[in-house]
Amino acid sequence: MSRPSKSRSLWDPAIVRPALVEAARKLSPRAMARNPVMFVVEVGCVLVTALFLRDLARGTATDVGFHVQLVVWLWFTVYFANFAEAMAEGRGRAQAASLRAMRTSATARRIRRAGDASPLPAGPMEGAGEVVNATALTRGDVVYVRADELVPADGEIVEGVASVDESAITGESAPVVREAGGDRSAVTGGTRVASDWLKIEIAQDPGAGFVDRMIALVEGSERQKTPNEVALTLLLASLTLVFLAATVTLEPFARYFGGTLGVDALVALLVCLIPTTIGGLLSAIGIAGMDRLVQHNVLATSGRAVEAAGDIDVLMLDKTGTITFGNRQAARFSPVAGVDGRRLAAVAALASLPDETPEGRSIVALARTMGIEPALPAGSTFVPFSARTRMSGVDAGDRVLRKGAGDAVLAHVRALGGPVPDDLAALVDEVASVGGTPLVVSEGRELLGVVFLKDTVKPGMRERFERLRAMGIRTVMITGDNPRTAKAIADEAGVDDHLAEATPEAKLAYIHRMQEGGRLVAMTGDGTNDAPALARADVGVAMNTGTQAAKEAGNMVDLDSDPTKLIEVVEIGKQLLMTRGALTTFSVANDVAKYFSILPAMFTGLAAFQTVRGDAHTSRFWALNVMGLTSPQSAILSAVIFNALVIVALIPLALRGVSYRPLGAGALLRRNLFVYGLGGVAAPFVAIKLLDLVVGALHLA
Amino acid sequence: MSPRLLALTVAFFAALALLAVPLGRHLARTFEAPLRPWERRVLTLAGVDPDRPHTWRDYALAALAFTLVTHVTTYALLRLQGALPGHATGLRAVPAWLAFNTATSFATNTDWQSYAGESTAGDLAQTVALTSQNFFSAAVGLCVAIALLRGLSRRETDALGNFWLDLVRAHLFVLVPGSAVLAVFLASRGVVQTLDGPAVWRTLDGAVQSVPRGLVASQEAIKMLGTNGGGFYNANSAHPWENPDALTNLAEMLAIFALPAALCVTLGEYVKNRRHGAAVFAAMTLLALAGVCALGHFEHQGNPLLAALGVDVTAGNLEGKELRFGVDASSLFATVTTDASCGAVNAMHDSFMPLGGLVPMLNIQLGEVVFGGVGSGLYGALVYVVLAVFLAGLMVGRTPEYLGRKIDRRDVRLAALYVLVPAFTILVGAAVAVVTDAGRAGVLNTGAATVNAPWGAHPHGLSEVLYAYSSAAGNNGSAFAGLTAFSAARPVFYSLTLGVAMFVGRLPLMVLALALAGSMARKKQTPPGIGSLPVEGPLFVALLVGVIVVVGALTFFPALSLGPIVEHLQLTAAGGAR
C-alpha cells in the first residue's frame, strides 16, 4: 500500500477542469438517454427554453429576468449531474494512467511465436529471436527477458529463475523470486526483472490483460450497469413516471378551474420532484466504487464482482500466510522413547538440507543451535514435497530420510514393514493440541520422533474476524493441517469454522454446500490447486504472487497479495450499495419540502382561488406557504436552485461513499434512515428558506 | 379523538386481533391441507388434474378466465332480468352500459353501484348474479394472495398450487361458513332475509309505501366478509335493514377487516416468521389508526360556516350521517371501509368535511393496502414490502433481499408497475373527466360560472371525480355520491371509464402479484443473519409505513391540493371571515 499519488484531492484542478468541459459534451441526447431521470430533465429544459425563445421572438415574454434564471438553473441541473459523472470518470482515468504506466510500450524479444510447437533450447538465449513491440505480443508467444528489462505482458515462466522487482504494481521495494513451475511462476506485465533471465509464455492477448480490463472499467468506457444498479434505475424511472403523471395531470385540473399553470412551472415542479439527486449521481457512485477498489490495489474484472463482495456471507481464508505468519518455525525435537534427541535432530536436519521452504530452513537452523552441522553426502537426491505424498526428504545412498505429515510418514514406514512406537501418537497429539504442526521424521523403516513446527497467529486477526462477524460474515479457515492442529489455530484466531486436511476437492465441496444453502462465498487463493475453488466462489480474490491459473479463475486480483484485503473489498462493496440507497432515500425525502415550496407558489396564479383578482398573494394557496417564502416566483426559483446545487453538494459524498461501520443491519438501517431519511426531509426546508432569502436580497425574483 | 371514538377504536382493534389470529392460522391450514378424496373427485369431474400444480402463468390464466366468465354471466343475468323469472314486478333489463359497469364492478370486487340496488335488481339478479359474484371475486383475491404466500415460502420451484383447488377451498372452508355465521347473526338483529317481496305500509297521511325486501342478510354478510361493499339497498349500510344497530355495525366492520387482517397472520405462518406477520399487521393498524384519528378529528370540528351562523356544532358535522351511528361510529366505519377495499358505507362520504373526506380518499389512493381487500390487500402490501426492502436493503449495504430472497430487477419492475398502474389510472382518469363535457356533466357540486370555466368549477366537484376514479382503480366501490355516474342522458362516459379503471385496478395487478410469486418461488433462499435486513420489529414497521405514505402522498398531494385541501382553506377562510 505504498503506491504514490493514492489520495487525490477531491477538487484537484487537473481533474475538475477537463470534467467541466466533458460535462457539457455529455449534454448530447444520445449520452443522456442512458439515464432516464436526467433525460426527462433535459427534455424539460429543451421545452422550457424553446417556449421562452418563442415568446422572446414574438415579444410576448413576461418576467424575462425570472424566466432566464429558471431556464439557466434547469440546464445547470443536467450539467451538474454530467459534471459528477465526468468527475468520477476523470478520477478513474487518472487512476488508469498510473495503471497504464506499468504497461510497457517497450520492446520484447520474441523467441517463439504462438502456435509454434518446436522445442526451445535450454539455457540463456542472449540475442536470439526477433525484437517486437510489446503490444504486438499475443497469447502463446514466448519472450526472453533478462536483467533490467521489463516483463512485456502477463505470462507464465517456462524456464529460468529470477528476482523480479514488482514495486510498480505492489509498491513493495524488495524484489521477489519467480521461477518456472510451482506456485510462483506468474509474472505481471510492467514488472522489472532485477537479476538473471526468464523465458515467459505470454498469457494474454493484447488489450485483454487484467490491467487493460481494469483501465477500461475505471475509465467508465466499458462500464456496464451492475444488477443492483439496473434495478435501482428501474425504480427511479418508475418514480419519474409517477411524478410525470402527478405533474402533467395538474394542468387539466387547473383548466377545470378556468386557469392554467404554464409549462415553466410544471417543468420546474417535475424536475424538482423526480429523483434528480440520485439520478444525477448514480453513475458517479458506481465509477467511484471501482476507483476506490483500485486505490486499495485490487483489480476487479467487473463491477458485478464488487457488488457481490458486499453480499458475502462466508469468507474462506487460507490459514497459512493469511491467519498465521506462514513461515512455521521448528521449535523443538521430540524423540520417541529409545531414540537420542541429537540423532533425531541430525536426521531431520539432513532430510531438510535441500528443502528451501522456511520450515525446512528452520529445522536446519534449530539443529545448528544444538551444534549439529549436517552435510549432504555426494550422490544423494532430494525428494520434494508433493500434495499427494505429503512428505519430503533425502535419499542418500541406502539411507532413506523422510519428514512429513504424521499419517503420511506412518504409512511410508508401515509400507517398509517398520514398527510404530507406542508413544508416537502421544507426541503428535501433544504438538497438535497446542496448534503446532507435528512433523514426523523417519529413517528407513524406523520412526525417530516429531519436530514441533510452531505456527504463529498474526496479531489483530481476532479483531478483524470480530469485525466481519459484526458485518454478518462467517469466516472459515482452510488448512491442510490435521483436525486437532486446525482446531487449536482456529480457536486462537477466533474463526467461526475451519476445514481441516483440505484437499482441492474438499474446498470445492465446502463452497458448493454453502452455496446450496443460499450463501455467497468469497475466498482468497494463490495456488493452481485453488483455481477450481476460486472459480466456484462468488468472489474469488487471487493473489498477484499466485499462478496465472489462479488469477484467471478469480474475479479479482490483489496486487499487494494480502489475503485479508477481502475485508476491505467487502466494505467497498457494501459502501457502494449503501451510498446508492442513502442518496435515493435523501432524494425522495427532499420532495416534501419542494412540494411545500413549489405547489402553493404555482397554484397562486389560479384566479379561482384569489380573493383579489390578479394578486397572487391573496390566493388561498398562499396559506400553504409554510416556509414564509418571499414570493411565488422566489419560491419556485429557490426550489429549482436547491435541486441543482444539491447535486454538486453531494458529489464528494458520492465519490467517497457514505461511511461504513461494521454494525448489524438493523443498526445500520436505523442510522441511515435517520441521517438520510429524516435529514432528507429537514435539510431542504432550511436550504430553500436560505436560498429564498438570498434570492430576495439580490432582487432576483 | 373523542373518548367515545377512542373506546370504540380500541375495542374494535382488540376484537380484530383476537379474531385474526385463529382465522389466519385456519387459512394456512386450509390451503396447505393434503388433497382430500372428495376434492380429487370433484376436481377430476370438472376436468381439472388436481395433481398438476400451476406455475404462476397457469395460475394467472385460470384466475383471469374464471373472472371473465363470471363477468360475462353477471352481465347476461342483468340484461336478461326482464325475461327471467324471480324478479319483483316492474323490474326490466338493466341498461347495457349500466350492466357492463355493474358486472365489471362486481367481478373486480369493487362493487361500485351506479344504480339504486333495490329499484334496479330483482331477487334473481341480487342473489344469483350479485351475491354469488361477491363470493367469487373475494375468493379469487384470496387465492392469489395464497399463491404469493406460497411463492414466499417455497424455494427453487415453479409450483404455486392449483387455482381450482384453492378456489373450492376458499369457498367451502372460508367464505361460505364465515358468511353463514355472520348472516345468521345479522338476521337475528333484524336484517331482513325473505323472499316474500316488498313490505307494504299505509303511511300516516294515507299513502301506500312499498319497501323492497329480499335475501339481504345473506348478501350483507358476504358484502362485508368479502370486502365487496355493494349494498342491497342504495343507502347501503346506513339502511336500517342492512345495519340496524351498534352491534351489527361493529360486526360488519369486523367482518370487513377479518380476512385481510387474518392474512397477515397467515403470512407469518407461511414464511415461518410470526413476527413478520405481526409487523405487517402492526403497520396496517398504525395506518388505520392514523386515518381514524384524522377523520374523527375533522368530523368533530363541525362546519365553520354553520358555526358562523350561530348553529351549535358541538356534536360535529352531522350532515349525511345516521344519527344511530353519529360522528364516531361513522368515522371508524368510513376508515375501515376505505382502508379495506370494501366500499360499504354507513355515512355519506361526500358530506364529510373537506379534510375529513380527504381521509377515505387518501386511504384508497395509498393502494388499498391498509388491510385492503380480501387477498388483494395482502398482495398489495407485500409489493410495498418488496419496495421498502429494496430501498432499505441498499442502505444496509447488501443486495436487497426479502425473506432471504434476493430482489432483482424483475421483482423491482413488477413492484414498480404494481404501484404505477393504479396511480396512472386514477390521475389520468380524473384529468380526462374534468376536461370533457361528459365528465363535467356528472358533477353535482359546482361553483360560480366564470368566463374560462363556464361550467362553474368547485374544488368539491374535483374531489367527487377524483374520488370516483380512486374508488374504481382501488376496487373500493364507495363514492362521493354527488357524482352522477350513470344517467339515461349520459350513459356511456363514466360507465365505460370507471369500468376500465376497475379492470385495470384488478386484473393486471393480480397478474403482477402472481408473477412476483413465481419469481420469488424460483429463488434460492439465504438463511437470515445479522447482516440481513430484519423484517420484524418497530424499525421495519416504521419503514413500511413510511414507504406506503411517502409513495401515496407524493403521488396524490398535488391533485388533492386542488380538491379537498383548497376547499378546506376556502371554508376556514370563509368561516373565519363571517
Image (tube, coloured by chain):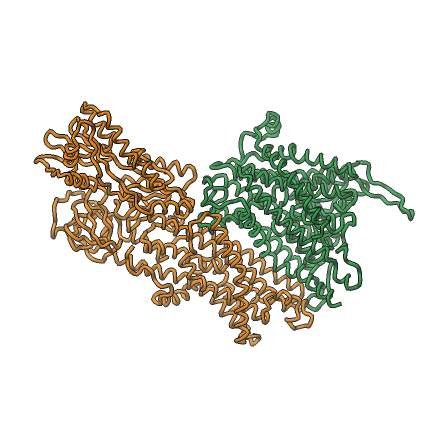
Chain colours: A orange, B green
Q: Nearer the viewer, residue B172 or A382?
A: A382
Q: Is residue A272 visible?
A: yes
Q: Nearer the viewer, residue A397 or B80?
A: A397
Where is residue B299? Give x, y as percent: 72, 55
Task: Describe residue A51's horizontal placement relative to residue B175 as left or right.
Answer: left
Q: Residue at x 21, y 42 (%)?
A: A358
Would you place residue A377 above or below residue B345 in this image? above
In the rendered picture of this protein, how many numbered marks are placed on residues? Answer: 0
Q: Which quadrant holds the N terminus of chain A?
A: bottom left
* Residue found at the far left of this picture: A378
Where is residue A551? Give x, y as percent: 29, 46
Q: Please tell me in which quadrant of the rendered image residue A260 appears.
A: bottom right
Would you place residue B160 above or below residue B499 in this image? above
Q: Which quadrant holds the C terminus of chain A?
A: bottom right
Q: Please tell me in which quadrant of the rendered image residue A105 appears.
A: bottom left
Where is residue B37? Give x, y as percent: 59, 25
Would you place residue B498 above or below residue A92 in this image? above
Would you place residue A679 above or below residue A352 in this image? below
Q: Is residue B234 visible?
A: no
Q: Nearer the viewer, residue B412 or A316?
A: A316
Task: Describe residue B458's horizontal placement relative to residue A140 as left or right.
Answer: right
Where is residue A542? Give x, y as percent: 30, 46
